[in-house]
Image (cartoon, grey):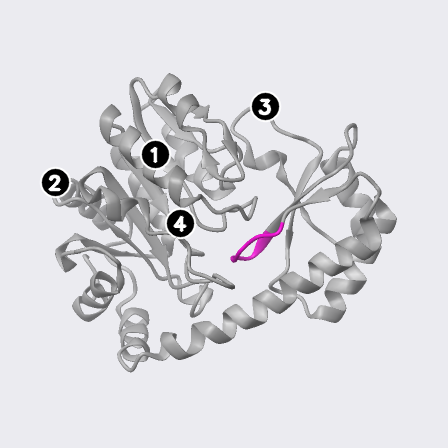
Amino acid sequence: SEGYPALREWVAHSLPWNVDPAQVLITTGSQQALDLIAKILIDKGSRVLVETPTYLGALQAFTPMEPEFVSVGSDAEGIDVGDLATKAAGARFLYVLPNFQNPTGNTMSEARRTSLSAEAARLGLPIVEDNPYGDLWFDAPPPAPLTARNPEGCIYMGSFSKTLAPGLRLGFLVAPHALYPKLLQAKQAADLHTPSFNQRMVAEVLKDSFLDRHVPTIRALYKAQRDAMLAALEENLAGTGVQWNTPDGGMFLRVKLPTGMNAVNLLPKAVERNVAFVPRAAFYSDAAQHNTLRLSFVTASVEQINEGVALLAQTI
């Protein structure tokens, strides 16, 4: 149930802090890790802190346990640590995506990570750190994980979906020794174990450093697609009141529409022109910003990006 030993050892040795393979649990995608964490750490009415906005899939995984979601103020550098301190009392954990966040594309700065880690340790607040995109940096790797700064106060999650193959449904979590047995128990109840054949295939692929050769090609491709989307946005939407960011990696960028526009209402009109996006309202646990949306630049060619952004601009 813990996972194929060779794969667990690879995960432990690949992380930038001292990890015992006995702390690694292989999961059926990192989405299952969210589900296991929810089952073990959340009771009805438990306070769970999340970024503003946060990953929709995490909200979906946590919601069946009936928590009280509390949004913590966030900006381009990450969590507002001062706001966190006012909301942390009684919270079970803080859920964060520090690297190329979904849906914003933002990356938490080194200074903010240092401050957040210290404050969470002072408060005794566990951190659930979700890092599916961390290897997809463009010009420079992101700062060290939060978990590397306080391993006993964090649960760390990773995935092979963004670097190898999403269809294999392989992820992992790294947990403190004291918490690991309960997460393992939840894993056994969920599906006994992640498919061994998939784990053995991935372990075989990884043993000759395939990812070291493969991931740079992904980075180069995604960077070119990001640059194409930024250029298309500038060409088609400069001066219209539409705003967007420049992510340093990952798969997404955020767009803010002029005040008064609603991305949910805009979507069907865009689909009529054969272009789609994700409204960001669903990524808020409360007080959603309805004039925001998420664009992905990784599944389309440069030609499709140019055409799609032009059609989106016409729709806006």
Q: Earlier in the sequence, mark 1 or mark 3?
A: 1
99 up-or-down from 114: above or below: below
Q: Which mark is residue 115?
A: 1
Q: Real-space Cα distance between discs 1 and 4? A: 28 Å
Q: Residues within 10 Å of mark 1 (few under 14, many from 20)?
A: some
Q: Real-space Cα distance between discs 4 and 2? A: 22 Å
141 up-or-down from 240: above or below: below
Instruction: State left or right for residue 246 relative to residue 41.
Output: right
The residue at which mark 4 appears reads as 31
Secondary element at tag 2:
loop
Q: Are marks 1 and 3 in contact (CB under 8 Å)?
A: no
Residue at far right of view = 314
Q: Earlier in the sequence, mark 4 or mark 2?
A: 4
Q: Which residue type carries mark 3?
A: Ala
Q: Are marks 4 and 3 in contact (CB under 8 Å)?
A: no
Give how far across and how far down residue 82 sits, in percent.
41, 23
The residue at which mark 3 appears reads as 287
Q: Are marks 4 and 2 in contact (CB under 8 Å)?
A: no
The region drawn magenta spans: 246-252
Q: Earlier in the sequence, mark 3 or mark 2?
A: 2
Q: Which residue type carries mark 1?
A: Ser
Q: Which mark is residue 9?
A: none
Q: Are marks 1 and 4 in contact (CB under 8 Å)?
A: no
Instruction: State left or right for residue 30 relative to residue 284.
Output: left
Q: Earlier in the sequence, mark 1 or mark 4?
A: 4
The residue at which mark 2 appears reads as 178
Q: Quadrant of residue 16?
A: bottom left
4 vs 3, front mark:
3
1 vs 2, front mark:
1
Q: Earlier in the sequence, mark 1 or mark 2?
A: 1
Residue at far front of view = 111
